[in-house]
Amino acid sequence: TRYFYRAAAVGKKPGEVGTFLTAPTSSADAKVVFCFSGDTRESYRPFLIMNAVRAQRPDFFLHLGDTIYADRNGTAHRLEEFWQKYRTNRDDLSTQYCFNQTSVYVTWDDHEVADNYLPGNPLAPIGQRAFLDYWPIRRVSGDPTRIYRSFRWGQNVEVFILDTRQYRNLKKGTMLGDAQKDWLLDGIGKSSALFKFIATSVTMAGGDSDRWEGFPKERQTILRYINDKKIRGVVFLSADMHYAAITNIPKSGGIKDITAGPLGAPLNRITNGTARRFDFFLAENFNFGKITVDPKNEPGTAALEFIDQDNRVFHR
């Protein structure tokens, strides 16, 4: 169902009319179109690429973290300074127009607090408070800081959004923590959706120890579970690396990690794009991924397109 809304406050002019589309029921054999990417650093405004996202008319947009850079262009320490980082990015007109017409799901990564931060960083609770103040995430009763969650979009799509930050424990070798890992495995095991998209802010392969490379045992536990249970249709979605890529996750039995971005941040000039794990690699533009699952045209398949800020498809 499509809804229209506007915000109003006493003594102020009402806001612009916005719109969003609600999800079809889990029994609906519906077409699903969504876009995803990450990484919006304020010094790279205007984020013109958000005009291209809006032009694709997705059912929803999935932001995979680094929604601000609290540790760049002046480091935020106080809550008001974190808030200002969000306000600066939200003042971007292209972002406003896009979010005014598109539902948004979001997770965070390190730059909402500090580069490669770990639990125990004194800025972590402040950065988390600001993140939850500025992003629409339904709170879980009894666990108000929980960010990981899942949502269903018809028969064909279920998205599992991970929190790869606040539960890390280097001594135990876990990125997700026991509760989140069990929730993920149980969820994908029980899901009847044709495709199970696992949204992780950091890549499953490549990069340094801050990504899944630093937690190989937990990564392999997840991949082994998927293969042992013969769970079909699992695809990982990631950002953070500032390139567009399709990666064959090592020792996964052919499971893919699709990486998009940045929306507006430095391009990755370091990663060797000829590495054998890549089916595709490009680090030459701001970009996002678009996924279409259309049971009428191509039953049993999902179409992936990488799109640049000029709204041009550069890989399909």
Image (tube, rainbow, N blue to C red):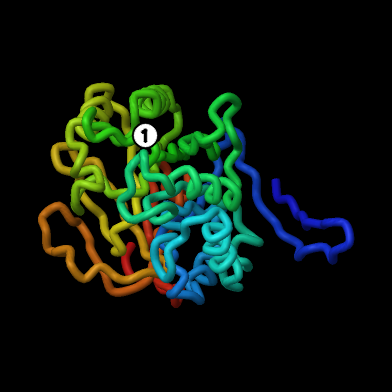
Q: Residue at left 56%, top 46%?
A: 132
The residue where tag 1 is placed is 167
> Residue 106, how many percent across, how many down?
50, 49
> Residue 20, how many percent across, how many down?
66, 53
Q: Is residue 257 above or below residue 99?
A: above
Q: Please name whichever residue, 255 or 221, is drawn nearer the observer in this view of the structure.
A: 221
Q: Please name whichever residue, 169 or 226, is drawn nearer the observer in this view of the structure.
A: 169
Q: Is residue 288 above or below residue 229?
A: below
Confirm whether residue 3 shows in the render: yes
Q: Please name whichever residue, 140 or 57, is drawn nearer the observer in this view of the structure.
A: 140
Q: Residue at left 73%, top 50%?
A: 3
- Displayed quadrant of residue 51: bottom right
Q: Residue at left 70%, top 56%?
A: 19
**Looking at the figure, which quarter contains the C terminus?**
bottom left
SS for dot 1: loop
Confirm whether residue 296 shows in the render: no
Graded by Cα atoms within 10 Å as few (under 14), some (14 to 19) or many (20 or more), the crowding at tag 1 reads some
**Looking at the figure, which quarter contains the N terminus?**
top right
Task: Looking at this view, name the residue that lies furthest to the right.
Answer: 11
- Left or right, 229 with respect to 133, comes to left
> Residue 236, how many percent across, how many down?
33, 44
Q: Amino acid at mark 1?
A: Tyr
Q: Residue at left 44%, top 64%?
A: 40
Q: How many marks?
A: 1
- Left or right, 314 with respect to 190, comes to left
> Residue 7, how many percent across, how many down?
78, 56
